[in-house]
């Protein structure tokens, strides 16, 4: 980011260094969420496996796109995205739930928990940047929309599974 752009954000009351750190935490979350979804799709067992795997893969793709959006913004702000996966654990807001139990219902619960955490993270970023940084605000809003949709998708699948086995 150019000096005039950075000064503009600071004049608007935004702590750019704090924002970069916040975005790096979200960046770590997105990479861990990507891996959790991707690996969960590989090991998933249960009915309806095909539908759940398709949803997990789609969500993984979205999480990777979110990481890309965040990395671009971090760089635009003059920061550096976290460079090693090992450090993601030090920065994560939402953690990582390894898909050790491949039961679809367990995977869905783990991923719903992750989406709910992500919703909180992006709400905070939106609040932090509102009326101060319209670019980051718009990015966070776009990602929040996806995370809300992901939560709804997963909860709907979970409800469908309950109905399938209800007698």
Image: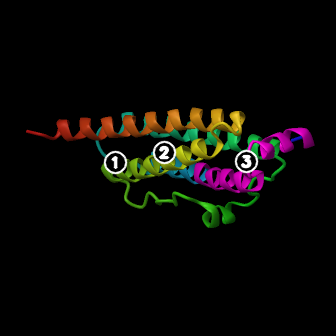
Identify the residue under disc 3. Answer: 14
The foreground one among 53 and 68 is 68
Mark 3 nearby-residue class (10 Å; few <14, some 14–19, many ≥20): some
Q: Which residue is drawn at 63% across and 38% down?
A: 130
Q: Residues within 10 Å of mark 2 (few under 14, many from 20)?
A: many
For mark 2, give the secondary structure.
Answer: helix
In the image, farthest residue toward the left: 167
- Any magenta on residue 29? yes
Instruction: Give the residue number, with chain letter if any, for mark 2.
Output: 119
Marks 2 and 3, how far apart in space?
22 Å
Q: Where is residue 146 in the image (x, y as percent from the top left)?
A: 51, 34
- Residue occupying image coordinates x 37% and y 39%: 154
Mark with earlier residue (1, 3): 3
Q: Give the range drawn in magenta.
A: 3-30
Contact, mark 2 vs mark 3 (Cβ under 8 Å): no
| Residue at (35% x, 40% y) in the render | 49
Secondary structure type for disc 3: loop
Q: SS class of the residue under badge 1?
A: helix
Front of the two marks 2 and 3: 3
Q: In which quarter of the image is residue 166?
A: top left
Q: Is residue 112 rendered magenta in the image? A: no
Give the main secondary structure, helix, strand or loop, of the magenta stretch: helix
In front of the other: 115 or 2: 2
Q: Earlier in the sequence, mark 2 or mark 3?
A: 3
Q: Name the residue under label 1.
A: 104
């Amino acid at each position: 980011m150019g000096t005039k752009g950075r000064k503009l954000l600071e004049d608007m009351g935004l702590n750019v260094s704090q924002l970069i750190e916040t975005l790096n935490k979200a960046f770590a979350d997105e990479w861990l969420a990507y891996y959790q979804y991707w690996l969960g799709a590989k090991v998933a067992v249960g009915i309806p496996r095909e539908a759940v795997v398709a949803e997990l893969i789609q969500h993984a793709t979205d999480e990777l796109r979110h990481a890309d959006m965040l990395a671009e913004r971090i760089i635009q702000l003059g920061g550096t995205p976290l460079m090693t996966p090992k450090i993601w654990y030090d920065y994560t807001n939402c953690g990582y739930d390894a898909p050790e139990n491949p039961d679809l219902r367990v995977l869905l619960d783990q991923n719903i928990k992750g989406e709910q955490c992500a919703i909180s993270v992006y709400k905070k970023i939106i609040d932090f940047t509102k009326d101060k940084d319209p670019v980051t605000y718009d990015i966070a809003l776009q990602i929040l929309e996806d995370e809300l949709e992901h939560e709804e998708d997963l909860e709907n699948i979970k409800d469908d599974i309950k109905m399938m086995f209800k007698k």
